[in-house]
Image: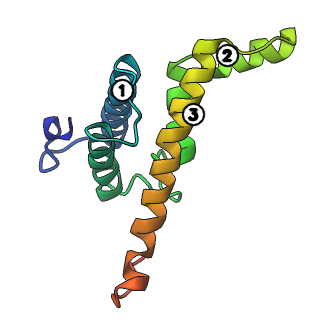
Amino acid sequence: MTENVKLDMPVSQASLIEHIASQLQEVVDEAEANTKPLEMDPYRGRLFELFVLANGAGLTDEEVEPNLTSDAVARILAERWGLRQEVSSSAEAAKAISNNGVAKMRLLWSLLRMWMEWCYAWDCWAKFHDEPPKSPR
């Protein structure tokens, strides 16, 4: 979980991205193994903690490179799970994606939907709470 990362010590951006991505993968894999939806606790709560960590480090900002925007999370996890290769192979062979591939894609979409919703809500917080907008990074 996120308590393994101490933000008060110097951590490279790349190592923090790797840590968060590995933790995201661990949560998703655990939910899958337990046949539980990501949208329910404890998985949702653990994923949100990782989002807060990524956002607090400025990694959900599209202007930051590398980052952990929803697109980047999709790329990282799809690569780790071999989804990019599977989709490419299935398209070339004109065959269906495996059941496991489809299941991983559904899990990835569930994670990304929550990640995008949290990004939107976090970015809109000040607008709806009479606070000045956050300064550009």
Q: CA distance from mark 2 to mark 1?
A: 23 Å
| Mark 3 residue type | Arg
Q: Which one is in front in this view, the residue at disc 3 or the one at disc 1? A: 1
- Name the spot of residue 117 as percent of width and height, x first: 48, 58
| Dots 3, 1 in contact, CB < 8 A | no
Q: Is residue 63 above or below residue 94?
A: below
- Relative image position of residue 27 (x, y in whole percent): 33, 29
Q: Dot 2 lies on which element?
A: helix
- The foreground one among 35 and 8 is 35
Q: Which mark is residue 85?
A: 2
Residue 89's place in the image compared with 120, above or below, is: above
Marked residue nearer the N-terminal end (2 or 1): 1
Position of 131 compared to 64: left or right?
A: left
From this viewpoint, is residue 69 visible? Answer: no
What numbered label is drawn on residue 75? 3
Query: In the picture shown, does residue 126 fall above or below 31?
Result: below
Q: Position of residue 84 (x, y in %)?
A: 66, 22
Task: Determine whether the residue tagged by mark 1 lies in a helix, strand or loop.
Answer: helix
Q: Is residue 55 above or below residue 81?
A: below
- Is 41 placed left or right of 25 in the picture? left
Mark 2 or 1, closer to the camera: 1
Tell me the kind of residue under disc 2.
Answer: Gln
